[in-house]
Image (tube, helix red, strand yellow):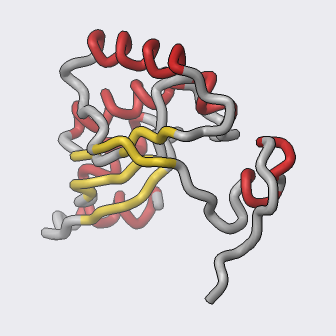
């Protein structure tokens, strides 16, 4: 990634890109991606609640998601993300805290929608359903 986008930036290529990304990209990486033509991303934010992100085994706290959104705003990268609901073990308090946080960050892109969680094959929930108190998990019939 580093060399590809650095080369595109150096050669001033007129290209635009869209990626699905993780939120652990550093500011320097976002800057390089923007210079190389990245204009839109769909980050795997899914929540601004560290408690829910932990339940999802996302590996990142809510503050990392906020920092990522700030970096995208700074570098002119548009983002589109959804807030997940129906996470096993979620409480109304988890959403109350997120609503309070949204009031503190009105300058950042809000979620595009509220989406019920679903099981993706090979996800943590699919592979280890018992850890999430899920039962009878199987692949969808073709």
State how many labels appear.
Answer: 0
Residue at the (23%, 31%) spot, across then down: 74
Image position of 101 (left or right of 24)? left
Image position of 130 (left or right of 134)? right
Image position of 73 (left or right of 67)? left
Q: Residue furthest left?
A: 14
Q: Front-most of 44 and 15?
A: 44
Where in the figure is residue 114, as x and y percent of width and height?
A: 36, 41
Where in the figure is residue 123, as x and y percent of width and height?
A: 69, 58
Image position of 134 (left or right of 142)? right
Q: Residue furthest front?
A: 136
Residue at the (62%, 89%) spot, across then down: 142
Compared to residue 54, the image places residue 42 above or below, namely below
Where in the figure is residue 62, as x and y percent of width and height?
A: 51, 24
Compared to residue 97, the image places residue 32 above or below, namely below
Q: Residue furthest bottom?
A: 142
**Residue 67 lies in quadrant:** top left
Q: Front-most of 47 and 142?
A: 142
Compared to residue 75, the image places residue 97 above or below, namely above
Q: Front-most of 70 and 12?
A: 70
**Residue 139 lies in quadrant:** bottom right
Residue at the (41%, 39%) spot, across then down: 83
Q: Front-most of 125 and 71?
A: 125
Residue at the (56%, 56%) spot, across then down: 118
């Amino acid at each position: 990634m580093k060399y590809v986008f650095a080369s595109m930036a150096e050669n001033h290529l007129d290209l635009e890109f869209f990626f699905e990304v993780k939120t652990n990209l550093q500011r320097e990486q976002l800057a390089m991606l923007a210079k190389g033509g990245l204009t839109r991303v769909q980050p795997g934010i899914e929540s601004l609640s560290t408690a829910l992100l932990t339940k999802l085994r996302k590996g990142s706290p809510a503050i990392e998601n906020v920092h990522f959104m700030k970096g995208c705003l700074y570098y002119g990268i548009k983002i589109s993300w959804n807030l997940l609901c129906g996470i096993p073990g979620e409480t109304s308090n988890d959403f109350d805290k997120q609503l309070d946080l949204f009031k503190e960050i009105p300058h950042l892109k809000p979620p595009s929608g509220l989406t019920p969680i679903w099981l993706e094959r090979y996800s943590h929930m699919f592979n280890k359903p018992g850890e999430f108190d899920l039962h009878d998990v199987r692949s969808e019939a073709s």
